Image (cartoon, rainbow, N blue to C red):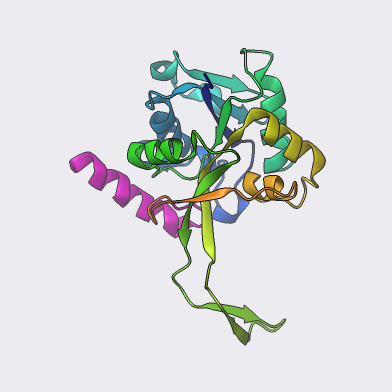
């Protein structure tokens, strides 16, 4: 029977948000941002272990208390220069700590998506656990899309038909994900599904929720905080 593992690449600096700390450690609802992703993943009964991939130079992780997750949480200090490199390094590093089979599932989740809910996670696992390829949470594009010219003027309007906005977790078999990331140009990849697509596979899109957005800019922190606070009240 296949097992489920979660992997959080967290070796980046998050420069676009304009703060001194790496983005994953910014305070959010009284905790470092990455805490919320870890909390949801560790709380999932299907998931055996949650692995966080940090930069070898990370000096922030040890400043926090992670003992509440000690049964499931493992740390790998093997992050790379890009997200894809960190994921691949983490996948290779898992085998030094755990027994993992080629057909076991890996759920890769962004540290900067703190509002993932247990219900969204369970739905993803249920939708994909018997799928031949795997897939990802995503939402259909609702906004009108404009393509600009070099002077930032609208050049034309793009059709949004059949367009989806990718989210995470993205869930694939261990062997397939390693093969996809090993053979792809990792400097150009922005998610794991695109690496799998380069092998000719078509990942399944599982309907997500707009609240599972990626914190990218300073104003996103305030919105994420409101969502998390409302969830605690309810």
Q: Residue at x 64, y 19 (%)?
A: 101
Place of residue 98 in the rendered image (x, y in percent of width and height, measured from the top left): 61, 13
Q: Position of residue 167 (x, y in %)?
A: 51, 50
Residue drawn where x is 45% and y is 53% of the image: 213
- Relative to 167, 187 lies left or right: right
- In the image, 156 versus 9, the foreground residue is 156
Q: Position of residue 58 (x, y in %)?
A: 64, 29
Tell me the magenta residue range: 213-234
Q: Is residue 140 magenta?
A: no
Query: Looking at the image, is 69 positioned above or below residue 107?
Result: above
Q: Residue at x 56, y 45 (%)?
A: 20
Magenta stretch, main secondary structure, is helix
Q: Nearer the viewer, residue 21 or 231?
A: 231
Q: Residue at x 42, y 19 (%)?
A: 69
Residue 234 lies, with reference to residue 158, above or below; the image says above
Does residue 82 appear to the left or right of 30 in the view shown? right
**Is residue 182 visible to the viewer in this orientation of the structure?**
yes
Q: Is residue 230 magenta?
A: yes
Q: Is residue 78 visible?
A: no
**Res 134 quadrant in image:** top right
Give the percent coordinates (x, y) of residue 186: 77, 45
Decide which of 11, 193 is in the foreground and name it: 193
Q: Could you tell me which quadrant the C terminus lies in?
A: top left
């Amino acid at each position: 029977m296949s097992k489920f593992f979660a992997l959080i690449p967290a070796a980046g600096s998050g420069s676009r948000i304009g703060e001194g700390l790496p983005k994953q450690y910014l305070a959010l609802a009284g905790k470092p941002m990455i805490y919320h992703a870890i909390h949801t993943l560790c709380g999932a009964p299907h998931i055996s272990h949650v692995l966080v991939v940090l930069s070898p130079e990370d000096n922030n992780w040890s400043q926090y208390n992670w003992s509440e997750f000690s049964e499931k949480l493992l740390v790998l200090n093997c992050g790379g220069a890009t997200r894809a490199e960190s994921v691949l390094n983490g996948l290779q590093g898992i085998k030094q700590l755990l027994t993992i089979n080629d057909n076991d599932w890996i759920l890769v989740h962004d540290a900067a998506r703190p509002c993932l809910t247990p219900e969204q996670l369970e739905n993803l696992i249920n939708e994909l656990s018997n799928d031949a390829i795997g897939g990802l949470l995503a939402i259909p594009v609702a906004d009108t899309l404009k393509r600009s010219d070099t002077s930032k003027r609208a050049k034309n309007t793009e059709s949004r038909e059949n367009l989806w906005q990718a989210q995470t977790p993205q869930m694939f078999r261990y062997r397939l994900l390693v093969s996809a990331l090993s053979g792809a140009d990792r400097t150009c990849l922005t998610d794991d599904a695109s690496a799998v697509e380069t092998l000719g596979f078509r990942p399944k899109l599982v309907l997500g929720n707009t609240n599972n957005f990626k914190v990218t800019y300073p104003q996103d922190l305030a919105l994420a905080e409101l969502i998390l606070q409302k969830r605690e009240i309810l």
